[in-house]
Image (tube, grey):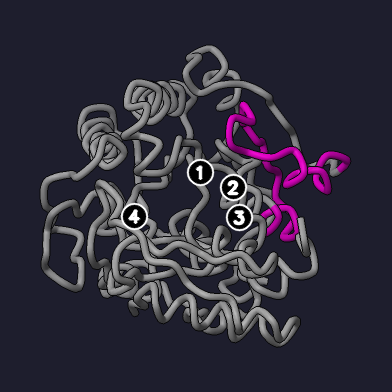
Amino acid sequence: MVASRIDFPSNLKILITGGAGFIGSNITEELLINGNKVVCLDNFATGKKDNIQKFILDSNYTLIEGDIRNLETCMNACQNVDYVLHQAALGSVPRSIDDPITSNEVNVSGFLNMLVAARDSGVKRFIYAASSSTYGDSTSLPKIESKIGKPLSPYAITKYVNELYADIFSKTYGLETIGLRYFNVFGRRQDPKGAYAAVIPKFTIQLMNHESPVINGDGSFSRDFTYIDNVIEMNLRAILTTNTEAINTVFNVAYGERTNLKELVELLKNFLGSYDSKISEVKIIYGPPRRGDVPHSLASIDKARKHVGYEPQYDIKKGLKLAMDWYWNNLKKN
């Protein structure tokens, strides 16, 4: 358990927006196991009721089915809450390109509603999911928090605006905020289905069904793939920190290594091949590059190490092994 490793307290009351989503439900589980109270706010646009079914009967768990685009709902959810972990958003670069208006309504207007609600409810700290997409067209590697480029998609714009709003609320209203720039998070409960599924769960379910994954481009694009337990750790550390240099700023949340898509597929085939030898024979298809994609992404995690003691325990291989075990045992042939 992550919380026990870093001596995380119990009996806090924490609101998780998007708490039925992949990341939100995993953070929820960690907090409940550790004896904390969790309020989940989710409209189930992308979150899944299956993700939270095991929590429903827990007396420390409260579900509010509602939308962050409604200020009154946000105000109700923030009542008597110690901390907010804002995970709710419409993710996916392609989704934002297809429908920039809805992405903006949820990711910007909804985010602003939550900031106002957190401010007016007197929460101790507002910790939010930022994104590595904020680095945009910057070609420098590794990515350092203070150096960003121009956004390459509507989604990236919305996540950068979140950072700007959080900064203003810190300076103008005194609301403590911490932004966590997630880098390609993967792991248990990440949805493999739908038009905007992330690459690891999408390729995993295709390989399990002996279908050929389609790599966008020549396979040389690389990412800093980050296992879910690393993300849980950073959220907990963001709650715990008393370091004034860590508050009202943003941090990269990653492992600090990059893997290209060709390498990723080979790792997936190797891990899944231990369950089904035919998976190693599945051919890979290469298609055109995807609009808005950044060629390479690699995070520096020096700032998080220095200011909050972040030490990710799961590299790509260790994380993929656990993730593949989960997918095989939970979604085989689905």
Residue to which mark 4 is pinned: 181
Horizontal side of 135 relative to 234 (left or right) equals left
**Residue at 59%, 30% in the rendered image:** 45
Q: Disc 4, disc 3: CB below 8 Å? A: no
Q: Earlier in the sequence, mark 2 or mark 1?
A: 2
Per the image, label 2 sits on a secondary structure element best described as helix
Q: CA distance from mark 4 to mark 2?
A: 15 Å
Q: CA distance from mark 2 to mark 1?
A: 8 Å
Magenta region = 29-57
Judge whether residue 304 is colored magenta. Answer: no
Q: Earlier in the sequence, mark 4 or mark 2?
A: 2
Q: CA distance from mark 1 to mark 4?
A: 13 Å
Task: From the image, state whether disc 3 or disc 2 is nearer to you.
Answer: 3
What is the quadrant of the N terminus in the image?
bottom right
Q: CA distance from mark 4 to mark 3?
A: 18 Å
Q: Amino acid at mark 1?
A: Leu
Residue to which mark 1 is pinned: 85
Q: CA distance from mark 3 to mark 2?
A: 11 Å
Disc ID at residue 190: 3
Residue to which mark 2 is pinned: 24
Q: Amino acid at mark 3?
A: Gln
Using the rendered image of the protein, determine whether residue 15 is visible from the camera's viewpoint. no
**Residue at 43%, 57% in the rendered image:** 238
Q: Earlier in the sequence, mark 3 or mark 2?
A: 2
